[in-house]
Amino acid sequence: MIRGDIKALAAYHVPDSSGLIKLDAMENPYVLPEGLHREWLNHLGTVDLNRYPDADMAGLRRKIAQREGLAPEQVLLGNGSDEIIQMLLLATNPGTCVVPKPTFVMYDLISRWLKRPVASVPLRADFSLDADQFLQVCAREKMEIAFLACPNNPTGNLWPEETVSRIARGINGQLVIDEAYAPFAERSHNHLIGPNVMVLRTFSKLGWAGLRLGYLLGDADQIAHLNKVRMPYNINALTQASADFLLDHLDVFEEQAALIRSERTRMFSALERMASVTVFPSQANFLLLRVADPKAVFEGLKEAGILIKNMHGADPMLAGCVRITIGTKEENDAVLAALQEIIG
Ligand SMILES: Cc1ncc(COP(=O)(O)O)c(C=O)c1O
């Protein structure tokens, strides 16, 4: 029988995007350049699909570790970083999980699946985080694990270094700094990694959302324990082969990320000039806006063939807000033109 609390949950909703410009899920809008695409397909042709994938993935972990300036033993691979969040919540003591509010929904959702209590610390109205309050809640709730998305989703801001390091130093439990949007941010936190601080990364936002590959960086002993709750063969052979190939061509994706960052700056200025729109500073590949009528903006953009995310109703602090992923220049121009029409 299905548990009552599971029956009461709303499933993670993924809207139908067929035929629409897809700016709802923070994907990289660029495809692989043609030559590289051909080479990648040739590489995939070398995979033996009749065999289980490499279970240990030492080669892949070595490549990632080298890029991060760490040892391969400090890298854990997951089927997207979502799966790693699940492994962390499975393997840590079943005490409270502390998160800011609003933040990425999967920390709360997976905790509920696992019947773990969650305590949330409201952000200030400008989406800044009070480190002292966060530490107080951690102490009061006897937290076992906390997640800080840096930059945060859905607000897009990156809390100051001082805020993050104060929490990292003061916390009594496991801190996971989730850097899903690191390719678009000015700072990463690998220097804070230690026995109780880990950094979570994903290739999804850099351009490989379809591959589902995330990784956790941490203390080698902690990683070895977490590896015990990793499904054998969690990374399929096609993803492994793709990642092995694409990691040798990261410059292509880094150039795409630079284009996205410069489009983010252009979009920010254009949106800032629109009357009745408040646009919040972002270090991610999306912008959060507050508008007078979010439903009209969402529906109006959809009619214009553009799918975004309406955040109104997700959290009281997100009243009037919509989240728009940064697309190609043409896609962004289409957003601006449609918004002008909708809100005049
Ligand atoms: C903060 C944050 N962490 C993790 C993820 C999940 O990424 P993945 O595609 O690696 O599962 C997301 C996805 O939107 C995110 O916003």
Image (cartoon, helix red, strand yellow):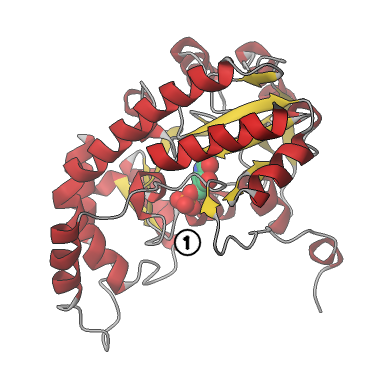
Question: In the shown orientation, is residue 23 left or right of residue 238?
Answer: right
Question: In the shown orientation, is residue 68 left or right of residue 35?
Answer: right
Determine the residue positioned at 81% across, 29% down: 316
In the image shown, does 78 or 275 lie closer to the viewer? Answer: 275
Determine the residue positioned at 55% across, 30% down: 287
Question: In the shown orientation, is residue 46 left or right of residue 328?
Answer: left
Disc 1 marks which amino acid?
Answer: Val
Residue, far bottom: 50
Circle 1 residues within 10 Å: few <14, some 14–19, many ≥20: some
Determine the residue positioned at 54% across, 48% down: 25
Q: Name the residue under label 1.
A: 229
Q: Give the percent coordinates (x, y) of residue 64.
A: 23, 47
Q: Give the percent coordinates (x, y) of residue 15.
A: 65, 59
On screen, 102 above or below 157? below
- Circle 1 SS class: helix
Q: Give the percent coordinates (x, y) of residue 165.
A: 46, 16
Q: Give the percent coordinates (x, y) of residue 35.
A: 13, 60
The number of numbered discs placed on residues in the rendered structure image is 1
Determine the residue positioned at 28% across, 73% down: 237
Question: In the shown orientation, is residue 344 left or right of residue 83?
Answer: right
- On the rendered image, what quadrant is the N terminus found in? bottom right
In the image shown, does 342 or 236 lie closer to the viewer? Answer: 342
Q: Determine which quarter of the picture holds residue 51.
A: bottom left
User: Can residue 53 be seen in the rendering of this structure?
Assistant: yes
On screen, 217 above or below 319? below
